[in-house]
Image (spheres, rainbow, N blue to C red):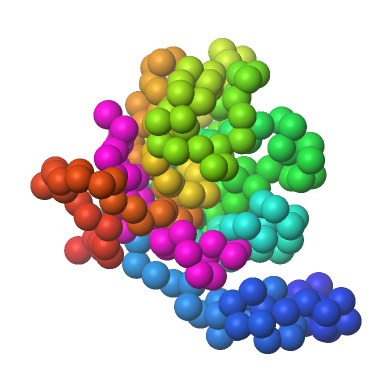
Amino acid sequence: MRVLDPVRDLLLGTQCLGCARPGRLVCRACAALLDPPPFVCWPSPPPPGLVTPWAAATYDGLARDLILGLKERALLPLADPLAVLLATALRAAIGPGRETPWLLVPVPSRRVTVRARGHDATRAVTSGAAGLLRREGYAVTVAPLLHLRPGVVDQSGLDADARQRNLAGSMTCPASGLRRLAHRQGRARVLVCDDVVTTGSTVREAQRALQEVGLVVRAVAAVAATVRRAPGWPRDPGYPAYGPVSWS
């Protein structure tokens, strides 16, 4: 029961990741701060052909601590506040079309990573965000259609070029998953979901694999995005800078 969470956290010595206050992993005051305006988060430079990427927070501060806490420390309750953030990005990516069927495709994790951590963080957060949106009347379905081919290494510490080489051709969308999807769901718009957009290589590869089997990817939605500028890269007016964006 959630009413027992603060007591259990106190007994276990848990403290808020945001302010270090004893109690829950995210106290009410810090949770109230997790309501930023979503923004278009083009990487700099963006991978050619990338659809519009949306994020709910910059990858720093509390948002970064939450993501790392879930992924690296298996603090599973953090999937809830991260789902709230991803839902924020998804609302922006969907715009006014909440009644249109949407497929939320989480970026796949390496099997060895899932086994080591004991959970698939991106899939859990995507499922949580979908639940929130369905309660608001959005017609969304989580569709884990993508798989990683063997040979993909951990992206941590890789620069943009190395990430692109590591991920090139790494994702596949098996026909069996598509057949099951076609049986359960008619034509739907597709959104790629991830925890963090950094160079954009991961979400671009996911987009490629889905488009290769005939699915049309409309946008990317992520919990957070890194804010970076490549040296000497002039901002293209066609790619908006990082910053708040809202639907009017």
Q: Residue 120 placed where, x, y %?
A: 68, 43
Q: Residue at x 69, y 74 (%)?
A: 25
Q: Residue furthest left?
A: 237
Specify whether residue 185 is painted magenta: no
Q: Residue 171 placed where, x, y %?
A: 53, 22
Total numbered circles:
0
Q: Is residue 62 left or right of residue 221?
A: right
Residue 97 appearing in the image: no
Q: Pick whichever, 196 or 232, lies toward us.
A: 232
Name which quarter of the figure residue 12 lies in.
Answer: bottom right
Q: Residue at x 61, y 15 (%)?
A: 176
Q: Residue at x 40, y 36 (%)?
A: 160
Q: Residue furthest right?
A: 11
Residue 154 lies, with reference to residue 84, above or below; the image says above
Q: Residue at x 27, y 29 (%)?
A: 48
Q: Is residue 118 left or right of residue 37?
A: right
Residue 165 lies, with reference to residue 3, above or below; the image says above
Name which quarter of the figure residue 82 lies in.
Answer: bottom right
Q: Residue 88 placed where, x, y %?
A: 43, 60
Specify whether residue 60 is painted magenta: yes
Tell me the quadrant of the picture where the N terminus can be found. bottom right
Residue 190 lies, with reference to residue 63, above or below; the image says above
Residue 176 appearing in the image: yes
Q: Pick whichever, 71 or 138, lies toward us.
A: 71
Q: Residue 114 placed where, x, y %?
A: 73, 38
Residue 17 lies, with reference to residue 176, above or below; the image says below
Q: Which portion, as a residue range, is magenta?
A: 39-66
Tell me the quadrant of the picture where the C terminus can be found. bottom left
